[in-house]
Amino acid sequence: MKAKRLYIIFTLFFILFVIGGKMEYKIQQPAVISDCNYTLSEALAGKVIPRDIKKDLRLVDVYYFSFDKKLHKGQLVIHKDLVNDIEWIFDMLKEKKFPIKSVIPVVKYHWSDDESMKANNTSAFNYRLVANTNRFSNHSTGRAIDINPWQNPQIIDGKASPEGSVYNPKVKGTISKHSMVVKLFKDKGWKWGGDWKTRTDYQHFEKLK
Ligand SMILES: [Zn+2]
């Protein structure tokens, strides 16, 4: 009799254990993959930035489908005047499932535009010069953004940057004259670097004062 009771108790515990295990297994993976989670001061760390520029910078969370077709969360450092535009544009891009590889502040790439571009990373603020010039880029005030640099290189004298990238409007994530991305930015008064005759810059959008 005692053995039978022990058997029943054991069986009950066994069932609970199995069901419990299965339930735990069923707990869903997070719906959003977080690509970064900086505070503003972390995102600006390690760079000397003039105070009058720094005071206008904001850190914005953005959501996008990456090339893995999963929803990701990233962050952009951008001028405060452009926060609403960026939130609206990214909402629209997400709705249309335009793929964006990642959106991570360039602090992760040691403030190197080359490293960030090679990683096909989308970014806005970077206190830096225009490549091969001594002019400050409009990224220096957080008034410009580069999207999917690998699909959307900058072309100077026939040479693509990032090195090794190829511009082909048929490839997913590429921005071309008639693409919805260009329309969204232009609707909000931004200029597209793809329209420039020299230093054609397919990844680049900017909105100055
Ligand atoms: Zn740019």
Image (tube, rainbow, N blue to C red):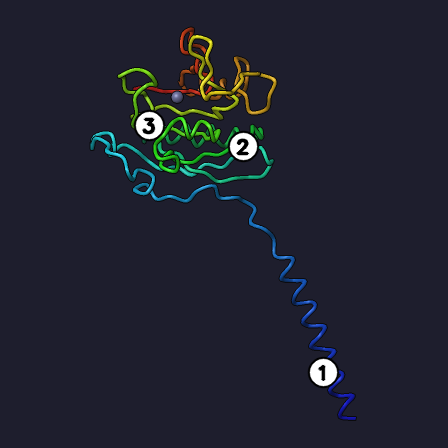
Judging by the rendered image, the residue that carries numbered circle 2 is: 94
SS for callout 3: loop
**From mark 2 to mark 1, how far is it between C-alphas?**
53 Å
Sequence-wise, the earlier of marks 2 and 3 is: 2
Across and down, in percent, residue 113 comes to: 38, 27
> Where, quadrant-wise, is the C terminus in this rendering?
top left
Q: Determine which residue is flagged by label 1.
A: 9
Residue 43, x across and y down, in percent: 34, 39
Q: Are marks 2 and 1 in contact (CB under 8 Å)?
A: no
Judge whether 93 appears above or below 27 on screen.
above
Residue 114: image tag: none
Identify whether 170 is placed above or below 52: above
* Amino acid under disc 3: Gly
Which residue is identified by label 3? 142
Quarter of the rendering containing residue 112: top left
The type of residue carrying mark 2 is Lys
Which amino acid, by three-letter code, is at mark 1?
Answer: Ile
Number of marks in picture: 3
